[in-house]
């Protein structure tokens, strides 16, 4: 099947719903807690609700895309995301905001799981990794721009404007999908399974070693990434006193490292093999998070100087960059043997990743103690899990 050169950019735009809606409101945590008088760390509950909605939503959206094709579930899900973001903008308290964040994640999950299934419909192996890297290039722009845009919107008005922008983005994505996205799953290849049969399919997918090890490798990488997402606003803005706009730049630099690595991944994987790239990237992840724990143990959080936050930021950069190599290879490896039900396999992988992400974000909030240690320690847990999974994954042929 031919793959139009512009299609990865459209898929990346749709998949960017997730990082956009996650990262844009990170600089607004303090403003949200102040307006609702909900206490320190309460904004992280809304982030955990978002991740939980993504975990459940991806499982559902993947099944729907295997049954009804890729286009219709993607359009409906993106419209639901847009409507729920409008609800977030109108929320009157932290509980209502959390509910609408869950609903927006449920709809937005379509944009995160279905584009991966579209890639698997049309390519495999190194070709799929190359396309996946192009997709990540586009969706990677979102985490670079989102925190800075969020900080700009905060400067212009209320944090609620952030969610109105997300609602408009969702409408735009739904329109592009309706007008441009081809259907990549023929009617003859669609699967209509009852609940029992679908559960059996998930069990069979989980029983395949290549899937479970690659999904776990990517999932623990996400665990570490979401610990950074949940903890970094409190560490860098609230405790080190960095302006939200500067935090946005810092976050964007880390995201740029992820993007650069994702673009180098197909070149290095072709030259040295995916296995070597994966082993190297997971070791860098482990070394970077060990460094973060070491700095968190020694830094004086009340000092506020560059000597306090800069070492943590450098370690975070290498931690995020390493995942630009790990994530594409994890996706390709997990879906390699599941061409007939790529939607279900992609959904199951996404559910594992964002389920771990929800636990990580909640853990950062629960363990918050005024230092960088909760964030750093949970990032280290993610690095250890990712390394163990990488060690046990089948070698790619």
Image: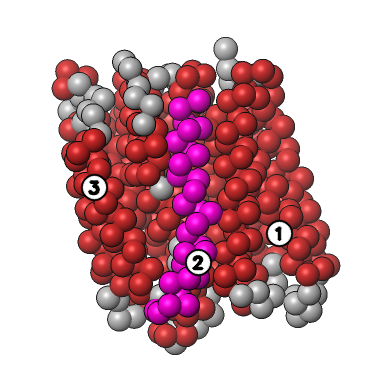
Residue at 55%, 59% in the rendered image: 229
Q: Earlier in the sequence, mark 2 or mark 1?
A: 2
Q: Answer few, some or many: residues within 10 Å of disc 3's Cα (few below 14, many 20 plus, some between 14 and 19).
A: many
Label 3: which residue?
174
What residue is shown at x 43% (from left), y 30% (from top)? Answer: 206
**Can the viewer see residue 362 in this picture?**
no
Q: Would you say residue 147 sits in the magenta stretch?
A: yes
User: Does the magenta stretch mainly form a helix, a strand or a loop?
Assistant: helix
Question: Which residue occupies the foreground of this view, 37 or 165?
Answer: 165
Q: Residue tagged by mark 1?
A: 313
Residue 92 is situated, as x and y percent measured from the top left of the image, at 30, 81
Foreground: 194 or 163? 163
Q: Position of residue 210 (x, y in %)?
A: 51, 24
- Lower sequence index among marks 2 and 3: 2
Say whether residue 253 is left or right of residue 81: right
Give above or below for 233 relative to 142.
below
Q: Nearer the viewer, mark 3 or mark 1?
A: 3
Q: Secondary structure at mark 3?
A: helix
Asked if the stretch drawn in magenta spans residue 149, the answer is yes
Q: Residue at image x 78%, y 70%?
A: 306
Residue occupied by mark 2: 26
Foreground: disc 2 or disc 3 = 3
Q: Which residues are magenta?
A: 130-158
Question: Which residue lies at the image location 47% right of the left edge and 77% below the top edge?
Answer: 155
């Amino acid at each position: 099947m031919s793959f139009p050169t512009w299609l990865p950019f459209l898929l990346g735009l749709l998949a960017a719903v997730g990082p956009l809606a996650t990262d844009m409101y990170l600089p607004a945590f303090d403003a949200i807690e102040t307006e609702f008088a909900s206490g320190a760390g309460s904004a992280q509950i809304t982030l955990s609700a978002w991740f939980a909605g993504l975990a459940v939503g991806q499982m559902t959206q993947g099944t729907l895309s295997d049954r009804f094709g890729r286009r219709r579930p993607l359009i409906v899900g993106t419209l639901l995301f847009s409507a729920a973001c409008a609800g977030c903008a109108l929320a009157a308290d932290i509980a209502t905001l959390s509910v609408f964040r869950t609903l927006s994640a449920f709809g937005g999950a379509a944009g995160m799981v279905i584009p991966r299934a579209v890639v698997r419909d049309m390519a495999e192996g190194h070709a799929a990794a190359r396309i996946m890297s192009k997709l990540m290039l586009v969706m990677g722009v979102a985490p670079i721009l989102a925190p800075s845009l969020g900080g700009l919107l905060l400067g212009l008005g209320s944090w609620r404007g952030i969610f109105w922008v997300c609602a408009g983005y969702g409408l735009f994505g739904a329109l592009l999908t309706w007008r441009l996205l081809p259907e990549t799953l023929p009617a003859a290849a669609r699967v209509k399974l009852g609940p029992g049969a679908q559960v059996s399919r998930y069990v069979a997918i989980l029983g395949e070693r290549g899937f479970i090890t690659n999904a776990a490798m990517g999932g623990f990488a996400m665990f570490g990434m979401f610990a950074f997402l949940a903890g970094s606003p409190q560490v860098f803005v609230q405790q080190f006193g960095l302006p939200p706009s500067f935090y946005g730049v810092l976050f964007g630099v880390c995201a740029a490292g992820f993007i650069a690595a994702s673009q180098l991944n197909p070149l290095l994987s072709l030259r040295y093999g995916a296995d070597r790239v994966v082993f190297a990237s997971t070791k860098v992840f482990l070394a970077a998070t060990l460094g973060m724990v070491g700095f968190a143990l020694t830094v004086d959080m009340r000092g506020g100087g560059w000597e306090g936050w800069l070492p943590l930021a450098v370690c975070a950069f290498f931690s995020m960059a390493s995942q630009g190599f790990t994530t594409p290879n994890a996706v390709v490896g997990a879906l390699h043997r599941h061409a007939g039900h790529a939607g279900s396999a992609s959904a199951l992988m996404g559910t594992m990743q964002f389920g771990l992400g929800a636990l990580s974000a909640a853990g950062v909030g629960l363990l918050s103690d005024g230092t960088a240690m909760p964030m750093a320690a949970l990032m280290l847990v993610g690095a250890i899990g990712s390394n163990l999974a990488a060690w046990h994954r089948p070698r790619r042929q």
